[in-house]
């Protein structure tokens, strides 16, 4: 007759874990308690089993697997250790406690100006024990920080149970516009148009000559001469202002030295000093080559005044179509 003692085991600490999906239950590894339960006993000579109830353990039925999903919180787990050689058994219990995970509300993307002068503050819920930001900033009360560049900013918060959760706040870039091209339709006698081709990460609106801002980059009904366009970033990252010109010509002129319309000229042509302008009579005779940077044509040929009539011109600007038109000289 062999009389053997039950295995000498230890009561492990409760298995305290952090929830993973805010429901209070968790898929836990019960076998992680084996080392503490065996307390130095040879695991090759001892078998550890887990049960959900004391009755199941007594009747040695419904053994739990080494990985188990809890059904209540906290949940008592009943364990037994059997020495394989003697079949002697010792029992122990412990609790599985699932602590809550910090809850952080999802946030929409925000917009931050590139190289912003004034920083933007981002924040998450207050009341946690520790905040650790991807910028390297951390502290017990640091639920908000200031940023001045677009990017992805991640904060990890820790609550009083030591459980953690993370949230990433995405700051999208915005910046002042860059004008890539200004496309004008000139020589339309007051119904000229301009379209502004811009690039940049922002959301832009447009205004010409201090008019109301509009989403469209196209403007019509423009008169000849110089205009000013303002292109404003809707996110407040700056306004670009630039002058542009609409080319057109006077339909008549009166060279009588009264100070009004004494010269015929092309409005805005000074922006194209390389332009070539010829003036002809109705029969095609070349009368004058006009300098783009000069005052215009005074209505003379070889210093002699020409009579009231219709005269023609051609305008050639490099890399642009040839422009032809006519105007009236009135005396």
Image (spheres, helix red, strand yellow):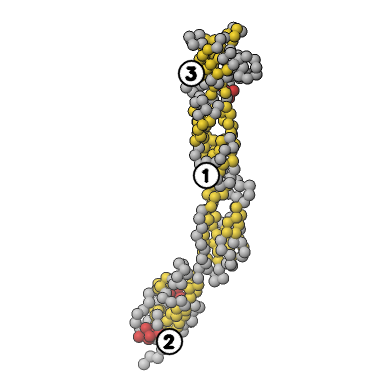
Residue ID for mark 2: 6
Percent position of residue 318, x then y:
51, 21
Q: Quadrant where the C terminus lies?
A: top right
Residue ID for mark 3: 324
Q: Quadrant of residue 330?
A: top right
Above or below, comparing residue 294 to residue 286 in the picture: below
For disc 3, the neighbor class at 10 Å (few under 14, some 14 to 19, many from 20) is few
Q: Closer to us: mark 2 or mark 1?
A: 1
Q: Residue at x 56, y 40 (%)?
A: 212
Between the residue at mark 1 and the residue at mark 3, the CA separation in whole angstroms equals: 39 Å
> Earlier along the polypeptide chain: callout 2 or callout 1?
2
> Earlier along the polypeptide chain: callout 1 or callout 3?
1
Image mark count: 3
Q: Residue at x 58, y 35 (%)?
A: 209
Side of 99 where 293 appears, left or right: right
Above or below, comparing residue 66 to residue 212 in the picture: below
Percent position of residue 202, x then y:
53, 44
Residue ID for mark 1: 203
Q: Closer to us: mark 2 or mark 3?
A: 3
| Secondary structure of the residue carrying numbered label 1 | loop
Residue 115 shows in the view: yes
Labels 2 & 1 near each other (Cβ < 8 A): no
Q: Quadrant where the N terminus lies?
A: bottom left
> Earlier along the polypeptide chain: callout 2 or callout 3?
2
| Secondary structure of the residue carrying numbered label 2 | loop
Q: Closer to us: mark 1 or mark 3?
A: 3
Q: Residue 260 has which mark?
A: none
Looking at the picture, tell me which residue is in the foreground, 9 or 213: 213
| Secondary structure of the residue carrying numbered label 3 | strand
Above or below, comparing residue 329 to residue 127 in the picture: above
């Amino acid at each position: 007759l062999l009389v053997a003692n039950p295995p000498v085991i230890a009561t492990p600490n409760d298995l305290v874990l952090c929830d993973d999906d805010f429901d209070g239950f968790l898929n836990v590894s019960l076998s992680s308690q084996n080392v503490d339960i065996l307390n130095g006993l040879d695991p090759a000579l001892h078998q550890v089993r887990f049960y959900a109830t004391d009755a199941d353990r007594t009747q040695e039925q419904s053994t739990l697997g080494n990985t188990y999903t809890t059904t209540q919180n906290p949940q008592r787990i009943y364990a037994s250790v059997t020495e394989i050689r003697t079949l002697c058994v010792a029992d122990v219990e412990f609790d599985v406690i699932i602590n809550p995970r910090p809850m952080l509300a999802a946030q929409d993307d925000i917009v931050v100006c590139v190289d912003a002068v004034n920083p933007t503050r981002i924040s998450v819920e207050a009341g946690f024990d520790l905040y650790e930001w991807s910028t390297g900033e951390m502290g017990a009360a640091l639920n908000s920080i200031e940023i001045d560049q677009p990017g992805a900013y991640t904060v990890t918060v820790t609550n009083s149970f030591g459980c953690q959760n993370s949230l990433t706040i995405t700051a999208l870039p915005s910046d002042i516009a860059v004008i890539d091209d200004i496309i004008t339709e000139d020589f339309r006698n007051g119904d000229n148009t301009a379209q502004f081709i811009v690039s940049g990460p922002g959301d832009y609106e447009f205004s010409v000559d201090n008019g109301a801002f509009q989403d469209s980059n196209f403007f019509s009904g423009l008169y000849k001469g110089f205009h000013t366009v303002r292109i404003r970033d809707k996110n407040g990252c700056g306004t670009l202002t630039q002058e542009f010109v609409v080319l057109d010509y006077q339909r008549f002129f009166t060279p009588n030295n009264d100070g009004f319309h004494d010269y015929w000229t092309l409005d805005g042509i000074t922006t194209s000093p390389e332009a070539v302008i010829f003036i002809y009579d109705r029969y095609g005779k070349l009368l004058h080559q006009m300098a783009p940077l000069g005052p215009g044509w005074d209505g003379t040929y070889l210093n002699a005044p020409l009579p009231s009539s219709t005269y023609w011109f051609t305008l050639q600007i490099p890399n642009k179509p040839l422009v032809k038109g006519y105007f009236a000289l009135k005396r």
